[in-house]
Image (cartoon, rainbow, N blue to C red):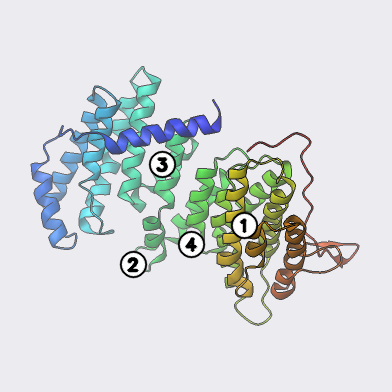
Amino acid sequence: MSKKTLWFVFLFFAFVVSSSSPVFSADSSSIDKVLKSAISSGGAIGPSDSRVIESYISRSLEDMIDAVDFSEIASIRREVGLRSIEKKPSRYSLAFSSAIENSIDPFMASVERIDSQQRKTQLVINLMILVAEAESMELADFSISMLDHENVAVRYWAVKALGSEGIANQLKVDVTGDKDLARRIIAAFESKVNPKTTVELLDLMVKFADQMQTAEAVSLINRIADVRIKAYADWTVKYESMEANLLDALANNIKAMTSGDGKKPGPCGKRFAQLYSYMIQRYILGYERFDIDHRKKLATIIGDVEVKSLSKLIGNHNSIKQVISGNSERFLEKLSSEHDKLLGSEKNAGKLCYEMRFDYGTTAGKPVTAPKKLVAPVVEVTD
């Protein structure tokens, strides 16, 4: 099964999950009273309320095990998710996530006793969606353990559970911040980055690392950039749209690193320039190979990166976008010329490298002023 087909299957599952009709398996009246009170009080609950939440979560996960089909499993999970609370962390949200945590081991033990592999996967996917929706640091260790799961949808929800904006915010603030957990999440992500990692997972990791902005986060972003750069060099890259977030994350870190006299962008500068260069070179070399929709999409991404991310580094800049959007006579030659002015050639350093004070390495003791050239593929590229 191809990656695209596999991801389509996942999206189909996600659609079924989100559109299933409600199934009130466990008694919800008691927890609804607790939820209503918690919402009105900013998340506060009493000691007995925790027992109500615990009982409801436990019964609901048992009902998921006993459900007759995937649609019912998803409906039960969805009903549980509706009884979460946006205010995090709060006494209610902590009790909610604690109840999930306490129910995970018996739930997984029951899953292991099921013969059908398909049903096992359906149950674990729904559990991971519930964990992701809880946005709880207390559930992070379980999510880390699921990063190795054989199913791509389970891995996706595990990354989403660890790398959500809510988790990032909790990790950064003084009251709930946990530097050790942040490092462990980033280390777990980095260990899973390789040429076979799906773009959807890489994109989630980039967004999380960009929010954290720690030394470990920068290392993760650079690692992902290296994987994408190699994919461009090998002409195996898919879904160039993820570069919008990746290049913006690199730009944010370059800006942070250079915010002071004499400071340089470090490894992020070279990676930003090389990756962006490869995107432009891919467009030029693939112009006759790509269909019109692909060309338009890639051109839009390249132009948007220039306006949004590059402009953070060297001020307002739109010459690339103007050329690539104009489609004027000999515009590919003009685009190549603008590429060299911005990113460098064998003769001269580009504007970005000059102003940000970095190069592409050294050879014979002299700085390299040009990014690596992309070699046209031997076979035709169709997407």
Q: Earlier in the sequence, mark 4 or mark 3?
A: 3
Q: CA distance from mark 4 to mark 3?
A: 19 Å
Q: Is residue 150 left or right of residue 118?
A: right
Element assignment for label 2: loop
The disc label shown at residue 212, or none: 4
Give whichever of 129, 345 is nearer the camera.
345
Q: Are marks 4 and 3 in contact (CB under 8 Å)?
A: no
Q: Is residue 80 above or below residue 270?
A: above
Give whichever of 383, 167 is nearer the camera.
383
Q: Earlier in the sequence, mark 4 or mark 2?
A: 2
Q: Is residue 10 above or below residue 162?
A: above
Q: CA distance from mark 4 to mark 2?
A: 16 Å
The residue at 20%/47% (across/down) is 83
Report the residue that reaches farthest toward the top: 115
Q: CA distance from mark 2 to mark 1?
A: 40 Å
- Mark 1, residue position: 302
The residue at 49%/52% (across/down) is 184
The residue at 37%/61% (across/down) is 170
Report the residue that reaches farthest toward the right: 364
The disc label shown at residue 157, or none: 3
Q: Residues within 10 Å of mark 2 (few under 14, many from 20)?
A: few
Can you say which quadrant of the picture contains the N terminus?
Answer: top right
Q: CA distance from mark 3 to mark 1?
A: 29 Å
Amino acid type shown at disc 2: Val
- Mark 2, residue position: 175
Find residue 238 and report its horizontal and vertical position in percent.
60, 41
Q: Are marks 2 and 1 in contact (CB under 8 Å)?
A: no
